[in-house]
């Protein structure tokens, strides 16, 4: 992963700043989001969980889960962790449960946290590597070329500031060697039925977080593995690292298909399994209904002529869903989803003709700063906003100065302080990590006062 930041000094400065920020006496409730995110880390405690006879899931060993399915004279592994080191740790645990050769590896989708350890699990067993054809045909995620995913995953944050990655303990913070293996067998269409080591399987094409996502259904054991179409957090319908809106209508349909299967147990690609048919149905139903509600509310507002800034003020999960433990905004957020849905369905233009050919940011900022009485006056107002805990306004004021004077040290310090305060109040790991990573970037080259 490409590194945007460097140096222990930046980490020390930012950590010191954050300690000062928190020590300045903010009430505990201001940080309730952060404390909920910390408690969420219990989802990733390291454990091999027995789901049912012959099915186990390794949670907390890597960025994503890995599943072992025991058959007759052979086993199946579903998803393979992020890297060689993590895969070896999981394989050692699985070896305590089964010594039979691995007959197949199923890759639910192409995200690297699910594919990086395939070679370790394959060993000398020469298993089939199964995936959907879209795994091979997928369009590269161009968003990563414009924005470093490490910002949302906190890849460069010091340990003192990092909590988790929302759906895993971490992503890319400690890069290690990978052992990716390409699929040797793919399928097109909606499903593939097969028997491996005496285990009946259905591989279901269930687009959601990715277009190639495959869910693994074990009809005889009533166990469903949904890949990344379900995890214990409001989903990332849009990733702030830069990506297209996920196929939201297909995601809703995929979840409906999963509900109809009537699984007894649900083993997601991240977070802990959901056990018991009633619990599974409730979890999947609330997940589907939550995503659908956000989509429906956004489209209804758009039909009324509302713009994104207006929509995010009122689109929210209904109370009955807002309290669901599976829809807390530890990863994705409703507001980001609303903006992405608008862009996907209506494009970038919000209907205000002033925005058809707007002034360049630098030109607009210069005029606003002049109107406000100059740079020092704007920075003075930013300091006041920071003192008044109006952190978003403080950040926006400093942006105006930095747009016309990108090297302004006072503006950088003020913006870093504002972003740090905003980050410390987030329940979303992605929001927290992005705020704090940006603050680190601003501070990395500043001279000591």
Image (spheres, grey):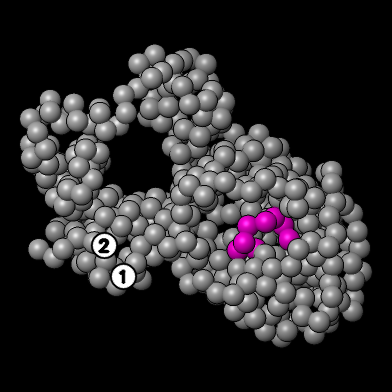
How far apart in space, not on screen, are marks 1 and 2 (Cα)?
7 Å
Span of residues in magenta:
106-114
The answer to whether the residues at label 1 and label 2 have Cβ atoms under 8 Å apart is yes
Q: Secondary structure at mark 1?
A: loop
- Label 1: how many Cα within 10 Å (few below 14, some 14–19, many 20+): few
Res. 133 in view? yes
- Indicate left or right for 169 with 383 as reference: right
Q: In the displayed structure, would residue 234 be above or below residue 116? A: above
Relative image position of residue 447 (x, y in whole percent): 16, 63
Q: Which residue is mark 2?
A: 444
Question: Which mark is drawn over residue 409?
Answer: none
- Quarter assignment of residue 306: top left
Q: Along the line of sight, which residue is nearer the eye, 268 or 107?
A: 107
Q: Is residue 163 left or right of residue 237?
A: left
Which residue is at a point 80% across and 65% down the rendered structure image? 129
Q: Is residue 252 visible?
A: no
Of labels 1 and 2, earlier in sequence is 1
Q: Residues within 10 Å of mark 2 (few under 14, many from 20)?
A: some
Residue at 46 percent of width and 49 percent of height: 147
Magenta segment includes 35: no
Does residue 63 appear to the left or right of 8 in the view shown? right
In depth, the one of 363 and 215 nearer the eye is 363
Q: Nearer the viewer, residue 132 or 138?
A: 138
Counting from the top left corner in percent of width and height, residue 185 is at 85, 59
Q: Nearer the viewer, residue 256 or 324?
A: 256
Q: Name which residue lies at 39% across and 65% down.
A: 156
Residue 7's disc is 1
Left or right of 172 on screen, residue 416: left
- Which quadrant would residue 51 be assigned to in this image? bottom right
Position of residue 153 measured from the top left corner of the image (x, y, whole percent): 45, 58
Residue 107 on the magenta segment: yes
Q: Is residue 183 above or below residue 245?
A: below
């Amino acid at each position: 992963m490409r590194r945007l930041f460097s140096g222990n000094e930046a980490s020390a400065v930012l950590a010191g700043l954050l300690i000062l920020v928190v020590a300045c006496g903010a009430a505990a409730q201001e940080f309730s989001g952060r404390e909920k995110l910390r408690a969420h880390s219990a989802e990733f405690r390291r454990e091999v969980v027995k789901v049912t006879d012959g099915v186990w899931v390794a949670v907390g060993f890597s960025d994503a889960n890995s599943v072992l399915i025991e058959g007759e004279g052979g086993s199946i592994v579903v998803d393979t962790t992020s890297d060689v080191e993590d895969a070896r740790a999981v394989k050692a645990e699985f070896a305590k449960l089964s010594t039979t050769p691995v007959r197949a590896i199923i890759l639910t989708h192409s995200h690297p946290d699910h594919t990086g350890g395939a070679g370790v699990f394959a060993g000398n067993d020469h298993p089939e590597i199964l995936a959907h054809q879209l795994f091979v045909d997928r369009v590269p995620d161009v968003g990563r070329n414009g924005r470093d995913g490490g910002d949302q995953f906190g890849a460069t944050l010091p340990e003192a500031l990092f909590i988790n990655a929302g759906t895993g303990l971490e992503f890319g913070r400690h890069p290690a060697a990978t052992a990716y293996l390409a699929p040797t067998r793919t399928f097109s269409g909606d499903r593939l039925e097969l028997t491996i080591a005496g285990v009946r399987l259905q591989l279901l094409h269930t687009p959601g977080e990715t277009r190639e996502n495959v869910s693994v259904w074990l009809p005889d054991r009533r166990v469903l593995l949904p890949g990344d179409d379900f995890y214990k957090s409001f989903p990332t319908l849009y990733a702030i690292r830069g990506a297209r809106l996920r196929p939201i209508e297909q995601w809703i349909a995929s979840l409906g298909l999963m509900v109809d299967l009537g699984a007894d147990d649900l083993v997601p690609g991240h977070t802990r399994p959901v056990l018991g048919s009633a619990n599974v149905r409730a979890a999947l139903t609330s997940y589907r209904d939550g995503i659908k509600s956000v989509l429906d509310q956004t489209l209804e507002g758009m039909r009324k002529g509302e713009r994104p800034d207006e929509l995010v003020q009122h689109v929210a999960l209904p109370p009955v869903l807002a309290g669901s433990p599976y829809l807390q905004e530890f990863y994705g957020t409703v507001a980001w989803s609303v903006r992405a849905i608008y862009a996907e369905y209506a494009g970038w233009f919000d209907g205000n003709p002033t925005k058809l050919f707007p002034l360049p940011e630098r030109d607009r900022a210069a005029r606003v700063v002049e109107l406000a009485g100059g740079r020092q006056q704007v920075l003075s107002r930013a300091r006041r906003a920071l003192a008044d805990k109006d952190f978003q306004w403080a950040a926006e004021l400093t942006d105006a100065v930095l747009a016309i004077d990108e090297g302004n040290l006072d503006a950088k310090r003020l913006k870093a302080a504002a972003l740090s305060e905003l980050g410390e109040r987030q329940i979303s790991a992605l929001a927290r990590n992005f705020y704090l990573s940006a603050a680190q970037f601003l501070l990395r080259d500043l001279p000591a006062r």
